[in-house]
Image (cartoon, rainbow, N blue to C red):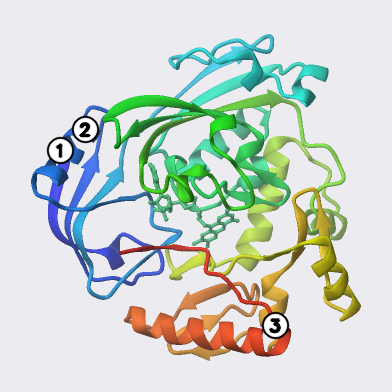
Amino acid sequence: MRISENVLISSLTTMRLGGPARYVIEIEKPEDIPEAYNFARTNNLPIFILGYGANTIGHDEGYPGVILTNRIRGISEQDITSAGDAPGGGPPLSVSEMGEEKARQDPPSGTCLKVMGGEYWDDVVAFACKRGLTGIEALSKIPGLAGAAPVQNIGAYGQEIADTLVEIEVFDSVTNTFKTLAKSDLQFSYRKSLLNTTEKGRYFVVSVTLALKKGQMSRPFYNSVERYIAENNCTDFSPQGIRDIVSRIRTDKLPDPSTTPSAGSFFKNIYLTNEEADAAEAKGYPVHRGHDGNKINSGWLIEKAGLKGKLLHGFRVSDKASLILINESAKSYQDLVAARTEIVGKVYDKFGYWLQQEPEEIK
Ligand SMILES: Cc1cc2nc3c(=O)[nH]c(=O)nc-3n(C[C@H](O)[C@H](O)[C@H](O)COP(=O)(O)OP(=O)(O)OC[C@H]3O[C@@H](n4cnc5c(N)ncnc54)[C@H](O)[C@@H]3O)c2cc1C
């Protein structure tokens, strides 16, 4: 493992905000993890786990503790010939984990990928698509590391990682042991899991195991994907074909974090009970009623509050996707607080909904 001192958090996060972290430890192999926790405990310092920093915001005063970053790389795969086969290199899978209701009707025939947490997520998607494996192709180009993907249950264009995740290997900082957590332990829902709710900060994700099948996604695809297909006469719906389509949609709409600082969607969508959804529709608000619940797109609320494209305290509300705040010229977390307060206040005044921030803060 590699230890550095006084590293600017702005250099480790895609929003490019944040003062110095007292220590940053790069974890290069699983055995480094208990050693890094010991280092922090011996020095009586708090720990924050960081991936690529695409969903994390730093504070101006920095962080007085140890930031652990996952640099453990590697992907191993094993064909699945029947439900319940074990993935290569990992602990055996339980049949219940492999064989969800759907999988039982249509036994998986594909591959289990065991991905170490320091792999860049989009490289994992590219790897799977090249092998003709379906299950994560719509999650193309989501910036971040594989170890962070289950934390907020990354999702896009009709897929989320919970759909294919079988289990994760973690280091448990409470018991100081390595463990395997099955998908059923992880309490996945929209942008949530055990890892960012009830057990936030407890587990360091070492690896992620996904069960992917040979084949392709079934239609209808997500609305914007269908629209793109119709407008561009696309005919290739293989995993690589969908990856290409999603990548083009995202490139047109979303900022590239390597050149344009942002943390992706800055606010979560608004989820409503059936009663609230009826009331919202009666007021003419567009409610999407899906398998994951009733939601109003917060980007629509921001746009209708007159904020699309506006520059607020150095942050541009993206004119292509109003949920995204681009850091054009802000240097301080205080600027972000001012911009956030203005947006949340305007949306509340107009619609009566409180927007909630999606990215985590290092504090
Ligand atoms: C332009 C842009 C577009 C985006 N589009 C999407 C999208 O379409 N869908 C979507 O879901 N998200 C999207 N995001 C958000 C982001 O890409 C995801 O949340 C991604 O999973 C973050 O990965 P990361 O490695 O950068 O995580 P970080 O920001 O570094 O960390 C995120 C959280 O995970 C924790 N964490 C990180 N690594 C580990 C680990 N090994 N063990 C335990 N905890 C860990 C951190 O403590 C933190 O709480 C987008 C972001 C940007 C900038």
Check contact, mark 2 vs mark 3: CB within 8 A: no
Q: Residues within 10 Å of mark 2 (few under 14, many from 20)?
A: some
* Labels 2 and 3: the sequence-earlier one: 2
User: Residue 175's quadrant in the figure?
Assistant: top left
Query: Distance between the Cα atoms at labels 2 and 3?
Result: 47 Å
Residue labelled with disc 3: 352
Report which residue position mark 1 lands on. 38
Disc 2 target residue? 34
Q: Position of residue 73 (x, y in %)?
A: 36, 33
Residue 131 on image: x %, y %: 62, 26
Q: Residues within 10 Å of mark 3 (few under 14, many from 20)?
A: few
Where, quadrant-wise, is the C terminus in this rendering?
bottom left
In space, the residues marked 3 and 1 are separated at their CA atoms by 47 Å
Residue contact at pointers 2 and 1, CB within 8 angstroms: yes
* Residue 134 or residue 290, whichever sits in front: 290
Residue at point 69% right, 44% down?
A: 159
Real-space Cα separation, disc 2 to disc 1, in angstroms = 6 Å
Front: mark 2 or 3: 3
Q: Residue at x 71, y 89 (%)?
A: 350
